[in-house]
Image: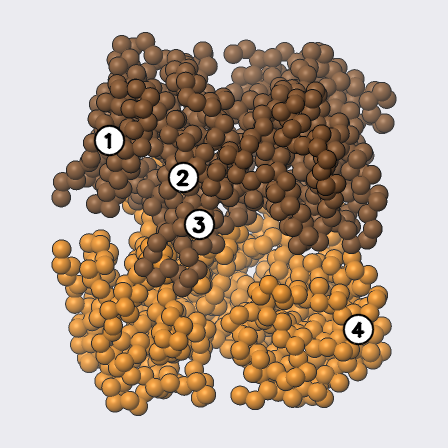
Chain colours: A orange, B brown
Amino acid sequence: MSPKITTELLKQLRQVMKSPKYVQEPVQAYIVPSGDAHQSEYIAPCDCRRAFISGFDGSAGTAIVTEQHAAMWTDGRYFLQAAHQMDNNWTLMKMGLKDTPTQEDWLVSVLPEGSKVGVDPFIIPADQWKRMSKALRSAGHDLVPVKENLIDAIWADCPQRPCKPLITLNLSYSGVSWRDKIVALRSKMAERKVVWFVVTALDEVAWLFNLRGSDVEYNPVFFAYAVIGMNTIRLFIDGDRMMDPAVREHLQLDSTLEPEFKIQVMPYGSILSELQAVCSGLSSKEKVWLSDKASYALTEAIPKAYRYLTPYTPICIAKAVKNTSETEGMRRAHIKDAVALCELFNWLEKEVPKGTVTEIIAADKAEEFRSQQKDFVELSFATISSTGPNGAIIHYKPVPETNRTLSVNEIYLLDSGAQYKDGTTDVTRTMHFGTPSAYEKECFTYVLKGHIAVSAAIFPNGTKGHLLDSFARSALWDCGLDYLHGTGHGVGSFLNVHEGPCGISYKTFADEPLEAGMIVSDEPGYYEDGSFGIRIENVVLVIPAETKYNFKNRGSLTFEPLTLVPIQTKMIDVNLLTQKECDWVNGYHQKCREVIGAELERQGRHEALRWLIQETEPLIRVQ
Amino acid sequence: MSPKITTELLKQLRQVMKSPKYVQEPVQAYIVPSGDAHQSEYIAPCDCRRAFISGFDGSAGTAIVTEQHAAMWTDGRYFLQAAHQMDNNWTLMKMGLKDTPTQEDWLVSVLPEGSKVGVDPFIIPADQWKRMSKALRSAGHDLVPVKENLIDAIWADCPQRPCKPLITLNLSYSGVSWRDKIVALRSKMAERKVVWFVVTALDEVAWLFNLRGSDVEYNPVFFAYAVIGMNTIRLFIDGDRMMDPAVREHLQLDSTLEPEFKIQVMPYGSILSELQAVCSGLSSKEKVWLSDKASYALTEAIPKAYRYLTPYTPICIAKAVKNTSETEGMRRAHIKDAVALCELFNWLEKEVPKGTVTEIIAADKAEEFRSQQKDFVELSFATISSTGPNGAIIHYKPVPETNRTLSVNEIYLLDSGAQYKDGTTDVTRTMHFGTPSAYEKECFTYVLKGHIAVSAAIFPNGTKGHLLDSFARSALWDCGLDYLHGTGHGVGSFLNVHEGPCGISYKTFADEPLEAGMIVSDEPGYYEDGSFGIRIENVVLVIPAETKYNFKNRGSLTFEPLTLVPIQTKMIDVNLLTQKECDWVNGYHQKCREVIGAELERQGRHEALRWLIQETEPLIRVQ
């Protein structure tokens, strides 16, 4: 990996930072954040501006360029990668280390008095703007919005914003029509006394209209905004996608509709002016609802007195609670996904000993088996296919430079998933194709105990997911082991593989309580730097639990695994399990055998079926 | 309990709200919060202004009086009590219920346009002021500080602010001299680049100077502030307490000292003007450190640019980590406390069957036995002595109207503690003096399992206490039971029985990580409304743990119980315990027998010793 040479690019950027063609007044510094205008986790190539200007293409990082300096802030996952990808023009700012200045402090230390710091107001979230602006102002500088993106101004061969065809989801997939979703949203708006709601997150737009796209890799979303009033619906979207008869039919664009369900289609780029127009017509006490993570540009368009900001929008919360059609779809998707993985693991058991299977080959094979399944659309994230020491790199993705051959002497960790039209999957299994050491089995078993502790947990209605995080760690902690990531994240239904507002992590506190119908991952792990990584991940559905005393009718919840892929018993030290844990594993494997076995049979995949039956033999605990 | 008649008082208050003698401009509403000028949890009689004006004397509540209305906000613990204690002039605002307006919303709904809302700036914390002021301003009203407290103005027989003699703690108790504490504080100040530190919490002043007082019941503190500079020490304190030769000697007031350790004693009431004087002399970049919970009056005295606010002060954090002298003192205090409780429980076993022991008698007897112990000072909180249904009232305190007789048919819950010169105790035991039902034993055993799960937990260095809270609930949750309070709080060393910055609760997130030397309570419970309450509470010390893999040298922690009082085995359903839990109980009881047995022997308390030996017989688990 050789660094990107950025001398010329930085020169050009510094020129536009002073050019009246782009800025009203020269800016002495320009901030290039990671995100897009929708605060998406995964972004399209045209939004990879920070990677373009610096060469560093990790998922998290902020670049700041001044007349003299260029600096990049990123976290511990990316110190090495950023150092490799950036040339000497750049200073790496290692976030999380004690002596690393914050962006604000650094700016204050390098800027001449009374400087202007520019940023694209569509890319910076309002809360970040506020913090940064306050810090700069107190030091005598100014944060200013620069309307035209200055990276785009110098990015000669900038890719076009994607504008791919849309997929319409009928009721059998979505369970609720977009009309009914609008009705429910308006009733939430009425409850909070707001008259407009601005949809800014791409997955929220997709969910609301029962549409999917492919503008962003792995995430079936499309670039759009929506503004919902009590009697109007405005959808801001570009391209000829609205000419597709299926889409027109789905959105009833050509039907005679009650006016409150008539969708006005407008250009994507007109959102700001339309929102300003909406706000100019507001009378006092009329409020506009917006996520507090929305861009500064849209937030500022709403006069302060009219803003109603919440951390989670009503769409985010409604989307998280899956309806029956969605959970049934998720079940189907997970059955197909398990079939693909049984095929893969059966194939690996035969091929790995030959020494011909690399991490990349294994990842490709996983995709090949998945793509054979009905309604497969694409992967849901870049496959983490890692063997031996690579397994200890939590966000590893095999590339030719790091690609390692699987062997009978190393642990193999596969974290992968797919988008099917009926659901999204995300599963991690850790396998050994030879004979694991006692220490490897010991660690694996602690991770399994943590996985079971969460999966089998019973908790009262109203419990937030972060309160379950320590259950996943207790067995590891007892022996002085831990893992430095959260235990679970929300999972979309044929949508983003990471979604709010719930999760299981020691890091969050503002998560919404778990509710029946929510879907999260359960994925504790253990990582030994330089040797191996272990993670066991199922996607689980929150379901009502039966308890002896039922919390005085408050009711209780537990989890049902949707993922039904065998957990390698060869890796388990049975004597470290309690009888209850042993029963859990056997019950889980029994279900895998029944449900996935039947589907393998149906699909005529007899070899994989034999593998499944062998892998789901009951554990026997010696007392 | 008959309500307090407040018609005349409210009339007087409404007069002073308009009187130019007290207010620059008339105020249309006046807020009477619960607290004192130090944001203390327990307050002196002279600070019980809200109780004086309304009659409601619960620990939490805010009164607001307008020209037409008088309203009281309090939480679920106090709905009944407040309703009983207040007359018809008052409207009870039940916090936590959906339809209850916030104070701000209510004010906005009842006030005439452009109103002024007054509050004593010394009583309202700065963060509350900010929130309230913002809400009122956005509705066209103004929150204004009223210098003279308007309740004091009409409180004819207001008790004097207490000014009781001080106790000096020598090194054998405190472990660190006040000079060394000042040195450590100044080094923290230098680290953060602040030049002044304002000590506002009473327990922080007491800890810093190794002094104790008795101005507030149960809390060995005294009314004072301190302002520490890099070269100056100012102590704001009233009365002739500084004439006491022991205090003068302890503070070296008459010695020739390096100027930076010379304590300037100033009147308590001069804090505001002195702080203003300090701030007027500041040059740019010189900051003043203050708790973000300090009063609005003191916070406002520091110009915004000079303020350095943190949720926990360096004193709060240093105070929480007990040194060897303090932990040894806490051990001694807990041994003496256990002796007193062995005496009490032995006495109760004999007396309860006679039907002559009431909750109040039992509480008094507990105090009597404690007061026989060396260095006993006072109780550390009002004893919760509750039998049968009263046990389900979490913050119950027996009064003649509710006083119930202990019997062999009901569960008895005693939550009590004391201040000894060497330490503070807080212990809860739940006993049955007859034969408990299977259900009572079942519930008790789940609570015990939760208690053990926390007490025996092993966790990596840097873990925050709130991450352990669910361990205490897991066994209850499995059967559909729960309790609606946190699991533990920090405990002072001959100081407040509740102290920050650590604790074990699902409710907090901003707690500081647990560290070896911190002391917290471990007190899960279960409450069956109308029938019984169960709680098992030990005070535990955070200590380093030994683990197999030691978190890659990050190190790990666990707890050591300081409380050594038998847990009634009669209440335990042994078959619900795992072998590990059974071993924990037996190990704990073995230690009680050894340590407390030796002390009972030494004190010649043979009957109590026999009781202890009988109560600490090992449990045997039938497989």
Dot in front, 1 or 3: 1
Q: Chain of mark 2?
A: B
Q: Secondary structure at mark 1?
A: loop
Disc 2 target residue: B540
Q: Amino acid at mark 1?
A: Thr
Location of residue B74 with respect to A562 vertically, above or below:
above
- Of pointers 2 and 1, the one earlier in the residue sequence: 2
Disc 4 target residue: A28
Q: Amino acid at mark 4?
A: Gln
Dot in front, 4 or 2: 2
Judging depth in this view, the residue of A193 and B410 nearest the camera is: B410
Residue under the point 67% across and 86% down:
A6
Distance (Cα) linking label 4 and label 1: 75 Å
Q: Chain of mark 3?
A: B
Q: Secondary structure at mark 4?
A: loop
Distance (Cα) linking label 1 and label 3: 32 Å
